Image (tube, rainbow, N blue to C red):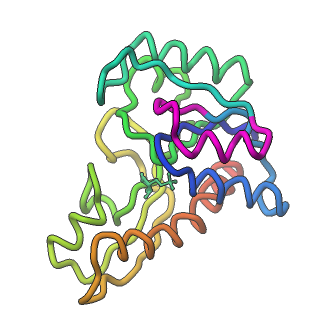
């Protein structure tokens, strides 16, 4: 399975997928890593591992993913013969035409037990809400915000003295375990 990854941040999920590929537990290859943030650490990690990278030019839009940029993204993914697109901390909503270019082949990891706490900083939402439990979800991406079919979830407790950061760190450990697992699941189907 040829995987393309889109991310905007630190890339720890990309690293977890790469580690699973490298230790032989995931029979796949990361062939391209794209970011809308030119200095995102995910690009550094990918370069260090010898994975081709590129920057998605979002034409100065802060959060929109303009159609021209999506078309360039599709072209780059197709040129690299990507079969599965994994969003790993990618901070823009995926819409047409990208969705229809990879039907049921775009995954996302979200830091909550969806459908609870969709959207931005789900770990902070859980702490602010006084939740006793949260977690993470890998799901197929559709045109909604964190609404696509759920593939796998993992729970973590929210402890009384948790801050958004301590909860996020606990959730991320589980993210790194379930993202490769979700990819295995997609490959088996
Ligand atoms: C993760 O918590 C993921 O669930 C969310 O953004 C964060 C990305 O982290 N969508 P990283 O860049 O993979 O370290």
In the visual, does 61 lie left or right of 43?
left
- Give whichever of 106, 52 is nearer the camera: 52
Say which of 52 and 151 sits in front: 52
What number of labels is visible? 0
Residue furthest front in the image: 39
Residue sitting at the far bottom? 160
| Left or right side of 61 for 40 | right
x then y, percent, for residue 98: 47, 22
Q: Is residue 80 above or below residue 8?
A: above
Q: Tell me where residue 185 sits by quadrant.
A: bottom right
| The quadrant where residue 167 appears | bottom left
Task: Choose between 44 and 186: the one closer to the eye.
Answer: 44
Q: Residue at point 69% right, 56% down?
A: 184
Question: Is 99 above or below relative to 174?
Answer: above
Picture residue at 67% right of the left edge, 55% below the top: 17
The residue sitting at the left extreme is: 129
Point out the stretch of residues depicted in magenta: 34-51
Instruction: Identify the residue at horizontal 21%, vertical 78% (top origin).
Output: 131
Q: Position of residue 34 (x, y in %)?
A: 58, 31
Magenta stretch holds residue 35 = yes
Does the segment drawn in magenta span residue 43?
yes
Q: Position of residue 15 (x, y in %)?
A: 65, 55
Residue lying at the far top in this picture: please name it. Answer: 68
| Image quadrant occupied by the N terminus | top right
> Residue, x 52% and y 29% (percent of image)?
103
Instruction: Where is residue 14? Give x, y as percent.
Output: 62, 50
- State left or right for residue 47 relative to residue 33: right
Q: Would residue 129 appear left or right of 158 to someone viewing this image? A: left
Q: Is residue 113 above or below residue 156?
A: above
């Amino acid at each position: 399975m040829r995987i393309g990854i889109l991310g905007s941040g630190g890339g720890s999920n990309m690293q977890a997928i790469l580690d699973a590929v490298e230790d032989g537990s995931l029979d796949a290859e990361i062939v391209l890593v794209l970011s809308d943030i030119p200095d995102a650490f995910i690009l550094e990690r990918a370069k260090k591992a010898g994975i081709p990278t590129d920057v998605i030019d979002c034409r100065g839009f802060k959060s929109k993913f303009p159609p021209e940029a999506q078309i360039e993204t599709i072209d780059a993914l197709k040129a690299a013969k990507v079969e599965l697109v994994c969003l790993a901390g990618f901070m823009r909503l995926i819409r047409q035409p990208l969705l229809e270019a990879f039907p049921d082949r775009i995954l996302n990891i979200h830091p909550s037990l969806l459908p609870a706490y969709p959207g931005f900083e789900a770990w902070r939402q859980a702490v602010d809400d006084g939740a006793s439990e949260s977690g993470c979800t890998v799901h197929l991406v559709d045109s909604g915000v964190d609404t696509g079919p759920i593939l796998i979830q993992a729970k973590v407790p929210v402890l009384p003295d948790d801050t958004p950061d301590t909860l996020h760190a606990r959730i991320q450990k589980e993210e790194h375990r379930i993202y490769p697992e979700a990819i295995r699941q997609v490959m088996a189907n």
